[in-house]
Image (tube, rainbow, N blue to C red):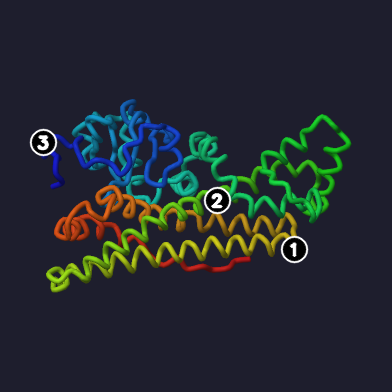
Amino acid sequence: MPAGQDAEDPTLGEVPLALDLSEDSAKDSLHILPLSSVPLVTGGLRDARLIKNSRFEGVVELFTDEQAGSGQVSPADLPRVFHFDQENRGDLPLIKNLATLPSYDVYSMRVELRRLGIDVEDVGDLRLSEDKVRALDPHMSAFTRPLVRAVFGPEEDKQRSVKDLVGLFAAPEAKEARSNLSKLAGQLRLDITGIPKFLEDYGDVYLSLAYYQACLDASRPKLERLLKALAALKADRNLSKERGLMAACSQVETKIATTVAEVGDILTMFRDRTTDMWEDMSQESFQRMENLIVDYQNKIGGALCVTTVKLSAWDEQFPRPDIGGPIRRADFLMSTMRSGLERLEPIQYHDKA
């Protein structure tokens, strides 16, 4: 039982990975799902959120406070906290299903909620925050650049977002708007009336890749620190004799490092494929690319969620090399870092284009 957990009170659990009270930060996270995003009946649950803890267990966080920490309860224990009857009994199986999902990022959740028969169009919270969207502009440039050049010509170097293009097409100068609409429509072999929908779809699907790239980039320095710490454990004169510990070091190192590299390769592949797509762009070629990316969102999100949770757990437990001795690090590795790594399966790429 984790320190601080009371067997008589299922609402008390480990401190979450990041004690962030911001609603936008939760919405932008891989490992936090505000339950206000889900059509629940139980009032108290709508104010809670699902999180992945450091052992990669999906638990309901009923409260988060800088002083008191995090109040967590496993989905199986929810009947000890809430009353379920004819009116709200459907909430329990839904939360149990959601707790098992590999990632809570907004893109993976859209896929999973559709699979569960929930209309995502009615779930307006499954969008990144405006601040996050702005922060992703540098990662979006690789995807917006060919779109901008399709409108303004190959010499165009000015950084413009999809939102900028939408604004341009709505400009009061009718001649300029018609000219730019005609350029893009001709490139796509689309009627001009189809351009707004195309821009919306294009911006959303590539924003998902920009988001995943930002999450991957944030994980790499943490991975370097973890690998150095594992190397030190392996080199420890006493601990190196512990076969179980050495096996755990190798498992954690191989699983996480391999997954980070694999996700990086998949995202690079999508960038390259997008460049190729614009050489012979059409509505059909974009539709194929969009379908392919959506097919992989759940796999990429799941892989990034596990690695991010694990790397963040280690980083927060041992923020500096001088914090926590070899025994404490070995214990944390065995008790926490290994848990949930079985979810990391190879992302096998199949080109359906």
Left or right: 248, with 284 as reference point: left
Q: CA distance from mark 2 to mark 1?
A: 21 Å
Nearer the N terminus, badge 2 or badge 1? Answer: 2
Nearer the N terminus, badge 1 or badge 3? Answer: 3
Left or right: 242, with 347 as reference point: left
Nearer the N terminus, badge 3 or badge 2? Answer: 3
Q: Secondary structure at mark 1?
A: helix
Frontmost residue, 225 versus 18: 225
The disc labelled 3 sits on which kind of residue? Answer: Glu
Residue 106 lies, with reference to residue 296, above or below; the image says above
Q: Residues within 10 Å of mark 2 (few under 14, many from 20)?
A: many
Left or right: 133, with 179 as reference point: left
Q: CA distance from mark 1 to mark 3?
A: 63 Å
According to the image, label 1 marks what residue? Answer: 279
| Nearer mark to the viewer, of 3 and 2 | 2
The disc labelled 1 sits on which kind of residue? Answer: Glu
According to the image, label 3 marks what residue? Answer: 8
Q: Would you identify the image quadrant in which residue 38 lies? A: top left
Residue 207 lies, with reference to residue 343, above or below; the image says above
| Nearer mark to the viewer, of 1 and 3 | 1
Residue 323 lies, with reference to residue 171, above or below; the image says below
Q: Are marks 1 and 3 in contact (CB under 8 Å)?
A: no
Q: Residue at x 30, y 51 (%)?
A: 315
Q: Which residue ends up furthest to the top in the rendered image?
A: 43
Q: Secondary structure at mark 3?
A: loop
Instruction: Give the percent coordinates (x, y) of residue 42.
Output: 33, 28
Q: Would you identify the image quadrant in which residue 310 lies? A: bottom left
According to the image, label 2 marks what residue? Answer: 210
